[in-house]
Amino acid sequence: MLIEVLKSKIHRIKVTDGNLDYIGSLTLDIDLMEKVGLISGEKIQVLNVNNGERLETYVIEGERGKGDVIVNGPATHKIKKGDLIIINSYAQINHESAYKFKPKLLIFD
């Protein structure tokens, strides 16, 4: 049996910009992606700490070292520059392995 578990989490990071006219997704500094094991195109869940909004999208690579967290497309109506967000990704693993699995976490304060 497979179950879905938390694979990666970036907790309470501040949105640096938004781009309504972009096709969609969330642009994230590649350094941040690598720290939690996210890959370009991976499905993510984004939780807005400021207003409770939740959405699913995918992550794309931003410029290394700039610290970008850019919300793109229609999501800019739900998440604004300066909002604190939580970014989660999940993986399906077998039930037995789940007991030993540890997600990669990056926590901002």
Image (cartoon, rainbow, N blue to C red):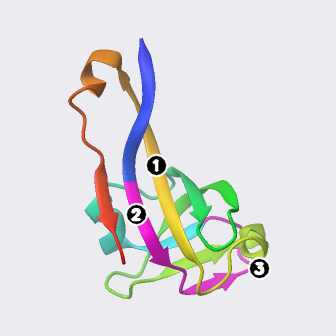
Q: Tell me the SS state at disc 1.
A: strand
Q: Tell me the SS state at disc 2.
A: strand
The question of residue 10 being in magenta is answered with yes
Q: Which one is earlier in the sequence, the residue at label 3 or at label 2?
A: 2
Quadrant (top left/top right/bottom left/bottom right) for the C terminus? bottom left
Apparent side of residue 4 relative to residue 84 in the rendered image (left or right): left
In the image, is residue 32 above or below residue 101? Answer: below
Residue 77's spot in the image, x, y percent? 79, 74
Q: CA distance from mark 1 to mark 3?
A: 25 Å
- Circle 2 residue: 10
Relative depth, front residue between 80 and 52? 52
- Circle 3 residue: 21
Q: CA distance from mark 2 to mark 1?
A: 9 Å
Q: Residues within 10 Å of mark 3 (few under 14, many from 20)?
A: few
Q: Tell me the SS state at disc 3.
A: loop
Residue 18's spot in the image, x, y percent? 65, 83
What residue range appears in magenta? 9-25
